[in-house]
Image (spheres, rainbow, N blue to C red):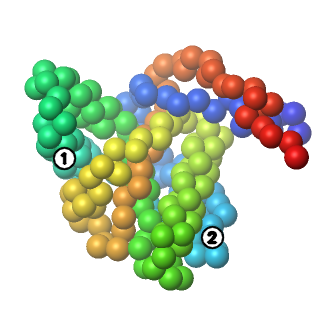
Amino acid sequence: MNDFHHFLRTRRSVRRFKPDPVPASVVDRILATAVHAPSAHNLQPWRFATVQKKINRKKLGEALTKKMQTDMRADGTDQAEIDKRVMISLRRIDEAPLIILLCRDMDAIRKEEPEEVEMGVQSVAMAGLQILLAAHAESLGGNWICWPLYAQNEARDSLKLPETWQPQAMIFLGYADETPTKALRQPAQKLLIVK
């Protein structure tokens, strides 16, 4: 039991990857584990797009950063800062051997109510955690990225995904080319109220 807790506590976000591709059999195992996440009403609203080809990573990166530039200009951000953020974002997308775009199928819902929509979003997030833990079990590094939330249409259109797929996040996966620093976590007791 302690080994499993140690495993869960040692997952870290990795931002630098070796160029080695992630084998298809490993991707299949990770996604097979992801679909075992819990979901509201067991609707399983998650959908996944795996992005490995350079041309598709480029299309996704250009779509996301184009929207980012528009938003940053509207916020009055200095052009040098915009250029820096775009360069970093494109580099990270290019260097990730595997990107899994996490989407919510907008048709996988019982009723069109805010709470039901939020339950779907939460369910997709649970599948995302399963992906990160399954990747950790495969000795891969991973990183959860929320950029698609700011450019849902652009992300979906860049990969020609179904209209009902609403991008929520993406996970960068690969063999780590860095040793992540120890995560600083608040003690659980500081975050707890016992009644």
Location of residue 80 by image quarter = top left
* Quadrant the N terminus occupies: top right
Q: How crowded is mark 2: few (under 14 residues within 10 Å), some or many (20 or more)?
A: some
Q: Is residue 74 above or below residue 166?
A: above
Sequence-earlier tag: 2 or 1: 2
Kindly identify the residue that appears in the image at 46 percent across and 22 percent down.
Answer: 177
Kindly identify the residue that appears in the image at 42 percent across and 50 percent down.
Answer: 169
Q: How crowded is mark 1: few (under 14 residues within 10 Å), some or many (20 or more)?
A: some
| x, y percent for residue 108 | 49, 77
Asked if one can make out residue 25 in the rendered structure from this viewpoint, the answer is: no
Residue where numbered disc 1 is placed: 67
Kindly identify the residue that appears in the image at 63 percent across and 70 percent down.
Answer: 40
- Identify the disc placed on residue 121: none
| x, y percent for residue 71 | 19, 42
Kindly identify the residue that appears in the image at 60 percent across and 35 percent down.
Answer: 139
87 vs 74, nearest the viewer = 74
* Measured Cα–Cα span from mark 2 to mark 1: 31 Å
**Residue 12 left/right relative to 170:** right
Asked if one can make out residue 141 in the rendered structure from this viewpoint, the answer is: yes
Q: Is mark 1 on a helix, strand or loop?
A: helix
Q: In this view, does 32 lie above or below 190?
A: below
Which amino acid, by three-letter code, is at mark 2? Ala
Residue where numbered disc 2 is placed: 40
| x, y percent for residue 24 | 47, 52
Q: In this view, does 109 lie above or below 81?
A: below
Q: Residue furthest left?
A: 79
